[in-house]
Image: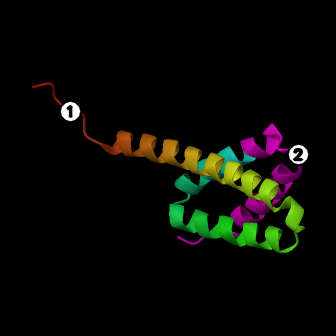
Amino acid sequence: MAVTQELQRNYRVAFLRYLPRREEAPLRAAYEIGRLAVIQGITILDLAELHHKVFLEVIQSTPEAELAGVTTGASEFFLEVLATYDMTHRSLLDQQRPPTTGR
């Protein structure tokens, strides 16, 4: 399933809010984005492509002296999305597995 325009917009807004101040609120948005991506059937590859697209837009207008900080912030944000995606995905898989018997 392709990333929706709403998810792209939400990702871009949260990402751009996170980079300058590294505050908790945009990270909570990243958490929610990861959770919703699983629920909506978005693949991890689609999330990586979305992140790359938004990150590329940002670094094209970032002064060279700020690239290291922006890159670190981008990594922190994306890891939050992926961590939540992973936790939610694992939880859903666990719910689908048949119970094991203790033989």
Could you say which is closer to the camera, residue 64 or residue 5?
64
Secondary structure category for the residue under label 2? helix
Residue 43 visible to an observer of this rendering:
no
What x and y, as percent, mark residue 38? Answer: 53, 54
Residue at the spot 52% in from the left edge and 61% down from the top edge: 44
What x and y, as percent, mark residue 20? Answer: 89, 51
Which amino acid type is shown beneath numbered disc 2? Arg
Q: Is residue 14 magenta?
A: yes
Query: Compared to 15, does 96 lie above or below?
Result: above
Q: Earlier in the sequence, mark 1 or mark 2?
A: 2
What x and y, as percent, mark residue 77? Answer: 70, 50
Residue extending farthest front: 65
Q: Quadrant of the C terminus?
A: top left
Could you say which is closer to the camera, residue 73 or residue 29?
73
Query: Compared to 18, does 25 lie above or below?
Result: above
Which amino acid type is shown beneath numbered disc 1? Thr
Secondary structure category for the residue under label 1? loop
In the image, taking residue 60 as reference, residue 49 lies left or right, namely left
What x and y, as percent, mark residue 2? Answer: 57, 72
Task: State the extent of the magenta-drawn residues as a range.
Answer: 1-28
The picture quadrant where one finds residue 74 is bottom right
**Tag count in the figure?**
2
- For mark 2, what is the residue? 21
Which mark is in front, 1 or 2? 2
Q: Is residue 4 magenta?
A: yes
Residue at the spot 80% in from the left edge and 69% down from the top edge: 59
- For mark 1, what is the residue? 100
**Dot 2, crowdedness within 10 Å: few (<14), some or many (≥20)?**
few
Residue at the spot 56% in from the left edge and 45% down from the top edge: 83
Name the magenta segment's main secondary structure: helix
